[in-house]
Image (cartoon, helix red, strand yellow):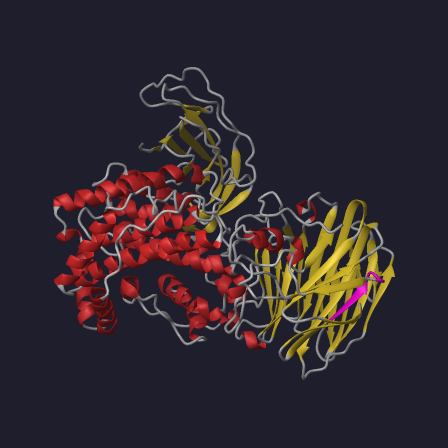
């Protein structure tokens, strides 16, 4: 379906329709508010768009096409932009708007020409410094794609330039490709169709996982090997490479498209089959006969339709699915490779383009974070960079113009400073090292031209290519000058994912003290399943307070019942219970954030995330750099409750009493002092509930501080003092309960810290020269120099 874009005139709010289309009977418009897991109405009322034009989104309804009106403020009698016959429930205009304030509304139309009523109008603004990124109209977009092959990662007219590079400046990279091709010739990958799951196998079992993941790696060996052979031949390699690539391609084409590697049967095998097959096809296209091309088209028609029918249009309104957020651009590759050769391939390309412009990325806002954590960020953004390459070459679209992608690398810089070991939030994050991110950050720096990201990779040995044919193509990108992060603040809030990273330095994890904090509006869904108001602590290269468990089987007993549980993180349970597991409805929120050179403050609220919900759980973290972290918790429940404060560490935690607790990892320690409440009782274990399977030997330590007596309300005031074993920090601290809250005074190694901690949101709290009403107010007084006063 084609979208018609008109510059129209509206008189007194009534659209004059070209051709005199009859209105007919009115249909009912579904304007229910967006629920958990739904993309929502965008631009939202009162929002400011950082991209120009904004993308529009509304609730879909079956068998309707759509029409949008957009009016500029002050021009209520004129509609400045009209789009008709919109196929999807999303739309990005093909031209930029002038900066200013607008209102938009939409309505639907059925096949008989009957209209719904207009939706409510929503006002939004376009910032003067917004990034211009209009989406080309369908005909223009598809018309940019080459009619001949190759079409993926390069255009036919660019092959000659790549061949010259292979002979000259990039001969070393080309020679590596040749060596890989020779290896493939000497030890060809197997091409027999892999087996399906045997009858009666238990999904998620070790035997099931072996087949599930084994079929993925089997498929990749065959078809990525074929793509490598085909690409290298294009650069001037042996014709034998092309013949072998064709052989592998055609033998894999005989596999049942809905069998063991079918997208719906096993998407971890089906997705790589789709994109590696398509790459091989376009790279080796000139040596395929028409009959052979037809064989390829037949199998990819089935596979492409299966992907498209699963993703479209559902993903445009309910996009919060992990695997679908890579499947859509893999489908885009298939569509480009087979455009004009498979009926419907144009729809696949158009759908993928609409996802990119209108509903991607889903796991962040424009800040550049990733709800699912650094492991999935690295994996998914790494794969997305393929699509960025493909769009740039095939359609002339620069992904890095999008605000998110202009900031994407800062997530790694703040979460994983050079040399850092382990992330904190998200499945698999504890297995990541900063050095693991160098290949991806190298590509992001090169493609975005960002000097900060280039500096980051140079601190860990310099840029590293992705290798293979993709690495060869990227090796031709322009070099980027490194820029140290001295002009950046040390701490940063990623508001869209509700995560804050507080650092003393971005230069070296070995010299950094870092507090990571999460309270997310995205809930605990997908791979970002930790409870809200959780935190982690690193110091001088060592993990101190950690997220626990072993991620080896998504949704298995250990993952579901321990890692999804509030008990597994540095958090607080109520009556032994915690927050909603793996749920978009269990939301948190960072309600305050402030960073200065001397002190950072972040405040989260997570009471509604509990099951059942509690009245409040407000956690404030005050980071007095580098030696003191104050965690202030306020909890209120509907009935008398017990509260369990949970901490986790790599090694056994030394507990003398509630004021003398020590966490140690190698030569770094953290001294912990529970100033309030009094009379806490402590238990500690290195067992999980439940433990992982027997082959997983990991054990970590879990400390629980319980209140014992029941109450409806409690405040925890806890001090954490990270330092090297060789260093001594003062232990002096006092906490005074006064009307409206507490006065906290802590001696520092080079001064004094004072804070007002409110217990009543409406009371005025005064003390030690500070005053606030229902808010935190603190002062850092160095022995020499000026004091820093911060409130939040």
> What is the x, y in percent for residue 217?
35, 57
Q: Residue at x 39, y 67 (%)?
A: 439
Q: Residue at x 71, y 43 (%)?
A: 612
Q: Say whether residue 495 is visible.
A: no
Asked if the stretch drawn in magenta spans residue 755, the answer is: no
Quarter of the image where one finds residue 733: bottom right
Q: Which residues are magenta?
A: 672-679
Q: Say whether residue 547 is visible.
A: yes
Q: Residue at x 70, y 78 (%)?
A: 785
> What is the x, y in percent for residue 742?
82, 61
Quarter of the image where one finds residue 452: bottom left
> What is the x, y in percent for residue 3?
33, 33
Q: Main secondary structure of the magenta part?
A: strand
> What is the x, y in percent for residue 228?
24, 61
| 54 lies above or below 370 | above
Which quadrant does the N terminus fall into?
A: top left
Query: How many numbered markers are drawn?
Result: 0
167 and 226: which is toward the camera: 226
274 and 596: which is toward the camera: 274
| 54 lies above or below 402 | above
337 and 590: which is toward the camera: 337
> In this rendering, would 66 be left or right of 602?
left
> In this rendering, would 668 be left or right of 451?
right
Which quadrant does the C terminus fall into?
A: bottom right
Q: Residue at x 27, y 57 (%)?
A: 222
182 and 82: which is toward the camera: 182
């Amino acid at each position: 379906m084609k979208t018609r874009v008109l510059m129209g005139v509206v008189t007194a709010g009534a659209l004059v329709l070209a051709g005199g289309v009859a209105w007919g009977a009115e249909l009912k418009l579904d304007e229910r508010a967006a629920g958990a897991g739904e993309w929502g109405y965008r631009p939202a009322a009162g929002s400011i768009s950082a991209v120009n034009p904004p993308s529009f989104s509304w609730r879909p309804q079956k068998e309707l096409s759509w029409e949008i009106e957009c009016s500029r403020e002050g021009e209520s009698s004129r509609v400045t932009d009209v789009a008709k016959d919109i196929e999807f429930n999303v739309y990005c205009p093909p031209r930029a708007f002038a900066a200013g304030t607008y209102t938009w509304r939409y309505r639907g139309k059925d096949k008989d020409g009957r209209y719904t009523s207009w939706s409510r109008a929503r006002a939004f603004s376009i910032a003067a410094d917004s990034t211009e990124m209009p989406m080309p109209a369908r005909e223009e977009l598809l018309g940019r794609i080459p009619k001949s092959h190759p079409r993926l990662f390069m255009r036919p007219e660019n092959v000659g330039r790549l061949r010259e590079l292979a002979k000259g400046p990039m001969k070393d990279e080309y020679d590596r490709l040749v060596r890989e091709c020779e290896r493939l010739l000497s030890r060809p990958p197997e091409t027999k169709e892999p087996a399906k799951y045997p009858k009666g196998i238990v999904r998620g079992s070790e035997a099931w996982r072996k087949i599930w993941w084994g079929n993925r790696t089997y498929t990749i060996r065959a078809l990525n090997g074929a793509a490598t052979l085909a690409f290298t031949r294009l650069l001037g390699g042996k014709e034998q490479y092309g013949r072998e690539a064709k052989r592998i391609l055609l033998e894999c084409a005989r596999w049942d498209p809905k069998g063991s590697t079918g997208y719906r049967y096993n998407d971890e095998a089906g997705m790589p089959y789709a994109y590696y097959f398509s790459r091989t096809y376009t790279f080796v296209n000139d040596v395929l006969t028409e009959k052979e091309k037809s064989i390829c088209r037949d199998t990819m028609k089935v596979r492409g339709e299966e992907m498209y029918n699963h993703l479209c249009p559902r993903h445009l309104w309910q996009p919060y699915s992990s695997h679908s957020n890579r499947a859509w651009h893999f489908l885009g590759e298939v569509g480009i490779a087979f455009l004009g050769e498979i009926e419907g391939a144009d729809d696949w390309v158009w759908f993928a383009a609409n996802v990119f412009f209108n509903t991607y990325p889903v796991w962040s806002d424009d800040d550049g974070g990733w709800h699912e954590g650094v492991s999935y960020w690295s994996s998914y953004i790494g794969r997305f960079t393929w699509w960025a390459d493909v769009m740039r070459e095939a359609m002339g679209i620069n992904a890095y113009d999008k605000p998110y992608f202009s900031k994407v690398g800062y997530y790694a810089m703040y979460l994983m400073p050079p040399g850092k070991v382990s992330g904190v939030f998200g499945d698999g994050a504890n297995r990541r090292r900063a050095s693991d991110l160098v290949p991806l950050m190298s590509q992001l720096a090169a493609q975005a031209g960002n000097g900060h990201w280039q500096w980051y990779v140079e601190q860990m040995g310099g840029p590293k290519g992705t290798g293979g044919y993709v690495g060869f193509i990227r090796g031709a990108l322009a070099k980027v000058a490194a820029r140290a992060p001295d002009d950046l603040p040390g701490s940063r809030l990623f508001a869209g994912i509700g995560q804050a990273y507080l650092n003393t330095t971005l230069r070296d994890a070995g010299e950094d003290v870092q507090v990571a904090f999460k309270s997310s509006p995205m809930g605990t869904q997908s791979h970002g399943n930790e409870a809200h108001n959780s935190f982690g602590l690193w110091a001088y290269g060592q993990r101190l307070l950690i997220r626990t468990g072993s991620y080896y089987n998504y949704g298995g007993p250990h993952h579901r019942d321990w890692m999804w549980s509030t008990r597994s993180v540095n958090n607080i349970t109520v009556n032994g219970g915690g927050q909603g597991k793996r749920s978009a409805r269990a939301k948190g929120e960072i309600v305050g954030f402030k960073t200065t050179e001397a002190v950072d403050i972040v405040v989260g609220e997570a009471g509604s995330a509990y099951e059942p919900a509690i009245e409040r759980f407000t956690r404030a973290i005050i980071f007095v750099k580098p030696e003191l972290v104050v965690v202030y918790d306020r909890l209120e429940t509907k009935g008398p409750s017990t509260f369990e404060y949970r901490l986790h560490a790599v090694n056994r935690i030394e507990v003398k009493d509630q004021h003398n607790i020590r966490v140690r990892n190698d030569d770094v320690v953290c001294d912990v002092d529970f100033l309030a409440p009094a009379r806490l009782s402590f238990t500690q274990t290195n067992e999980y509930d439940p433990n992982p399977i027997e082959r997983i030997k990991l054990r970590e330590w879990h400390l629980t501080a319980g209140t014992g007596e029941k109450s409806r309300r409690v405040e925890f005031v806890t001090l954490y003092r990270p330092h090297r074993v060789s260093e001594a920090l003062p232990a002096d601290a006092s906490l005074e309960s006064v009307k409206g809250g507490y006065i906290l005074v802590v001696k520092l190694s080079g001064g004094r810290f004072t804070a007002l901690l409110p217990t009543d949101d409406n009371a005025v709290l005064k003390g030690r020269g500070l005053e606030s009403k229902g808010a935190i107010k603190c002062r850092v007084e160095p022995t020499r120099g000026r004091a820093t006063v911060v409130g939040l």
